[in-house]
Image (spheres, coloured by chain):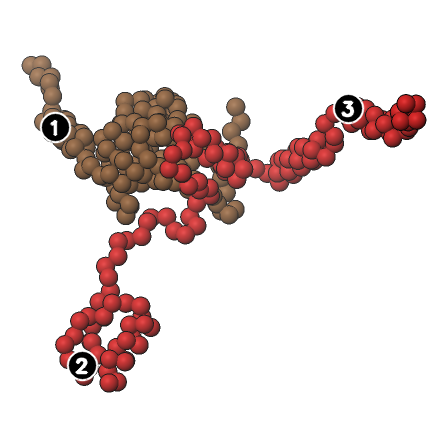
């Protein structure tokens, strides 16, 4: 009674198929491991960018999506920059340039796109609030 | 005082020529697989495309140089496109993953050619090696 219990316990612990054995007295001496195909070449995170392609996705959209991801990761800029040695002064200049570009973009995003139109809209709203004609009183 | 007889063709050269022909005939009959990985290595001077099976064993490789391009034309986008088409036609892939390495000009052209060739892509990865401040690169060119 104890032997089958131990064998089932073994199988649950190992989560492996056990070798078939006839005698109920002793547990199997060999544990058969299912032969698995070797894993893919790339490790869990051996890439900079990855896009998974949908079933019915056009080649243009695949290509566009991949390019966008690569641009976002900044892979190509990094490679081109690291191709030649960059001195400390050059690095400082580049970083200042990049920071300026980033700040400019942020400022543009924060500002309203058409300020004069926004001003017109607010003035119109104010006029409508002040407009207190009573049509019912006239009629 | 007699003139030396000029050699028309040495035996060594003939043997090399034969070997080269044999190699190319072998290469064109690459084993055909339906599922695999396409590795695109786009350097600044050349584009090399290697087709492997899912385990990473090389089935076929092709480069801009083997496709007949010389010198700076090897780095062109057209060379990359031709290389990709050549590699896929020879192997006859149906499903594939694409691994892109490097930042050469043949990179985008090769990827576009692979996408248009009718191979069903499961995923595209950029596996360009990035140093974490590794070796010092060569000094800037002063032209």
**Residue B42 coordinates in the image, percent (x, y):** 39, 32
Residue linked to disc 2: A24
Q: CA distance from mark 2 to mark 3?
A: 88 Å
Residue linked to disc 3: A117
Say whether disc 2 or disc 3 marks the residue closer to the N-terminus: 2
Residue A50, compared with residue B29, is above or below; it is below
Dot 1: element: helix
Which mark is in front, 1 or 2? 2
* Quadrant assignment for the C terminus of chain A: top right
Residue at image coords 28%, 67%: A16
Task: Please report, as a chain letter, where disc 2 is located.
Answer: A
Dot 1: within a 10 Å radius of its alpha carbon, few (fewer than 14), some, or many (20 or more) residues?
few
**Residue B117 coordinates in the image, percent (x, y):** 31, 28
Q: Which mark is residue A5?
A: none
Observer-nearest of A41 and B12: A41
Q: CA distance from mark 1 to mark 2?
A: 67 Å
* Quadrant assignment for the N terminus of chain A: bottom left
Dot 3: element: helix
Task: Please report, as a chain letter, where disc 1 is located.
Answer: B
- Chain B on-screen colour: brown
Left or right placement of residue A90 versus residue A37 in this view = right
Question: From this viewpoint, is residue A10 visible?
Answer: yes
Residue at image coords 32%, 72%: A12
Dot 2: within a 10 Å radius of its alpha carbon, few (fewer than 14), some, or many (20 or more) residues?
few
Which chain gets the red colouring?
A
Q: Which mark is residue B18?
A: 1
Observer-nearest of B38 and A18: A18
């Amino acid at each position: 009674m104890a032997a089958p219990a131990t064998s089932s316990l073994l199988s649950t612990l190992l989560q492996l198929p056990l070798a078939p054995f006839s005698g109920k007295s002793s547990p199997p001496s060999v544990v058969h491991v299912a032969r698995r195909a070797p894993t893919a070449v790339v490790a869990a995170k051996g890439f900079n960018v990855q896009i998974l392609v949908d079933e019915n996705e056009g080649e243009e959209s695949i290509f566009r999506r991949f390019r966008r991801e690569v641009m976002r990761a900044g892979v190509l800029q990094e490679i081109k920059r690291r191709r030649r040695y960059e001195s400390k002064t050059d690095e400082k200049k580049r970083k200042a340039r990049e920071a300026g570009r980033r700040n400019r973009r942020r400022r543009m995003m924060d500002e309203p796109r058409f300020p004069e139109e926004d001003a017109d809209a607010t003035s119109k709203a104010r006029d409508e609030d002040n407009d207190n004609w009573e049509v019912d009183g006239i009629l | 005082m007699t003139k030396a007889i000029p050699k028309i063709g040495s035996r060594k050269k003939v043997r090399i020529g034969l070997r080269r022909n044999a190699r190319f005939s072998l290469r064109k009959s690459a084993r055909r697989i339906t599922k695999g990985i396409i590795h695109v290595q786009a350097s600044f001077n050349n584009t090399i495309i290697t087709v492997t099976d899912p385990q990473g064993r090389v089935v076929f490789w092709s480069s801009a140089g083997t496709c007949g391009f010389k010198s700076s034309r090897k780095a062109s986008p057209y060379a990359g496109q031709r290389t990709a088409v050549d590699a896929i036609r020879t192997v006859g892939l149906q499903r594939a993953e694409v691994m892109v390495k490097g930042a050469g000009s043949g990179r985008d052209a090769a990827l576009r050619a692979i996408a248009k060739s009718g191979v069903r892509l499961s995923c595209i990865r950029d596996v360009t090696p990035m140093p974490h401040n590794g070796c010092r690169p060569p000094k800037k060119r002063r032209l």
